[in-house]
Amino acid sequence: QLASSLNLREEYTVAISFEDVESSVKYQVDAIKNKKPENFQMTVLQETEAKKFWQLVVNSGPSANEIQGENVVASIKIGVKNLDVLQVLMHLEQLEKTYEIKLTAHGSFGTGLCQVNIEGSSQYITDFIQEVQLYVSEIGGYTIVTHLPFSLRQKVDVWGGKPDHFFLLQGIKGKIDPKNILNYQRFVGGI
């Protein structure tokens, strides 16, 4: 769905950015052209068009605590091993049908990070987020709810559970803020 919202075809899309001197970028683009499968459609954007495209990707998520009638808009960030990105995106697509939500998502093989924007009813959104958190933790990743109306944040662990190193975070917080008054319950594990 993200691809279609960016005026691309509605299918899995790979976007690659090359930044270097012009001759190096041309060499890298030519290398991709020579190795791409026959049925693979490729579009090359020049500098100005490419900047606009990447800005659209970055700004594809919600910008406020949006509740539109019965629909809620939310966002989650997922971190997994680089090559698990495609597996996660495919799993999200299956869950989209189960939970009757609208989903736009993109991921980076370079960083292992996925951005997922969700629109749907409050109940479906919270159930979807909890299922995604469980799935991602089972494959060794993490989730952070980056955008969700306040009323729903009370029903979901926005940090996706306590990491193994939580005791270190708790110790640091205890030394810096012994009275536990700074940003109360606004960080991992509710510290």
Image (spheres, rainbow, N blue to C red):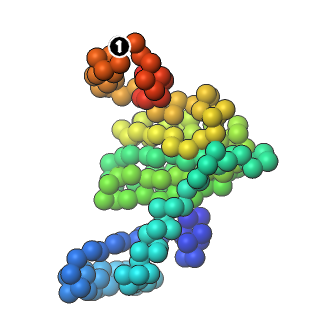
Q: What residue sits 43% from the left and 58% below the top?
A: 107
Above or below for 22 versus 79: below
Can residue 170 be seen here? The reply is no
Nearest to the observer: residue 179 or residue 61: 179
Query: Residue 148 at x, y = what percent?
Result: 60, 41
Above or below for 120 versus 34: above
Secondary structure under tag 1 reads loop
- Quadrant including the C terminus: top left
Q: Amino acid at mark 1?
A: Pro
Outermost residue on the top side: it is: 179
Q: What residue sits 22% from the left and 77% below the top?
A: 20
Residue that badge 1 annotates: 178
Can residue 159 be seen here? The reply is yes
Query: Residue 35 at x, y = what percent?
Result: 29, 81
Query: Residue 93 at x, y = what percent?
Result: 57, 55
Categorize mark 1 by other alpha carbons within 10 Å: few (<14), some (14-19), many (20+).
Answer: few
Query: Residue 170 at x, y = what percent?
Result: 34, 20
